[in-house]
Image (cartoon, rainbow, N blue to C red):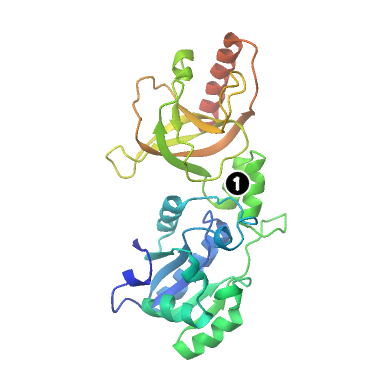
Amino acid sequence: MIVFRGPDDVPAGFGPAVVAIGKFDGVHAGHRAVIERAQVDAAAIGAKVVAVTFDRNPLALLRPDLSPESLVGVTQKERLLADTGVDATMILTFDRELAGLTPREFVERVLRPLGTRTVLVGSDFRFGAGGAGTPETLRELGDEFGFRVDLVDDVRAVGEGRRVSSSWIREVLAQGDVARATRLLGHPPSVWGEVVHGLKRGRELGFPTANLSPRLEGFLPADGVYAGWLVDEDAGLRPGIRYPAAISVGTNPTFDDVSTRQVEAYVLDETDLDLYGHRVEVAFTARVRGMASFDSLDALIAQMTDDVARVRDALS
């Protein structure tokens, strides 16, 4: 997949293209439906498929008090979009200049260089300064600039009748329901970041952990212990090496000396694995239990031993 950091990166003569526009936060099942529709349309006319998205939620600039926490960061979004099979992704820096473009200027500066023939958006799509542009505005501009506009219906969860959305996924992750989040996303929820030195308490207890830097990408599920996978992105291999892991999210209430929520991953059966400084992805597949405080180290070790056994069963 080609990644354009803006319209200036697009080479002359690129296209024709079928373009899907959206925030693509989480690249969930609803987003994938839009992309799959774009792929069908592109195959019919021999065009490329391009996802146009942003480096942040526009509200982070326009109304930071209303901006939700993102499900994924830019690195994660790039990889998830690449996994869908799109030919290219354009990641626009959402700054004051971009926010100030009129709908016409957006079409001229962003869509025209791609050789756009079809644009796919949701019914709630808004673009241009102050959200002045609607799908109907885009259709009118499409008549002028030579592309058509298709609206893609919402994807609704079977049996619940609710639209699959990033806000819903945040809700279920806040409850620790990573299995349900996986169904809504179409892939396990994950975080991505660098392994840093911690207090080394896990090593002292017999369960050495990889501690992720607090400056990580992704939305943390509720505090607790999870089964999942650690993928070493700096292992010198592509794709990275994947390890089964018991993952802790929280502030370690037994010792009560951690001020911010952190992610620690114990790679099963590995005691000498050196991951310091490596960039890793930690994916959550099942919740084992909530976070708890223990009265003694022996009680904590016994619980961790049981956690590892349950993680092993969940991943088998």
Residue furthest bottom in the image: 144
Image coordinates of residue 174 in percent, x first then y, are 65, 42
Count of labels in the image: 1
Residue that appears at 66% across and 56% down: 157
Residue 46, visible in the rendered structure = no
Residue that appears at 51% across and 46% down: 218
Query: For this view, does 69 lie left or right of residue 16?
Result: right
Three-letter code, disc 1: Ala
Q: Residues within 10 Å of mark 1 (few under 14, many from 20)?
A: many
The answer to whether residue 30 is above or below residue 311 is below
* Residue 276 lies in quadrant: top left
Image coordinates of residue 99 in percent, x first then y, are 52, 70
The answer to whether residue 23 is above or below residue 127 is above
Which is more toward the observer, 311 or 103?
A: 103
* Residue 62 lies in quadrant: bottom right
Reading the image, the residue beneath label 1 is 181
Residue that appears at 55% across and 51% down: 70
Residue furthest right in the image: 160
The quarter of the rendered structure image containing the N terminus is: bottom left
Which is more toward the observer, 144 or 151?
A: 144
Residue that appears at 47% across and 80% down: 105
Image coordinates of residue 51 in percent, x first then y, are 44, 66
Query: For this view, does 220 lie left or right of residue 278?
Result: right
Residue 173, visible in the rendered structure = yes
Image coordinates of residue 247 in percent, x first then y, are 52, 30
Kindly state the secondary structure of the residue where label 1 is placed: helix
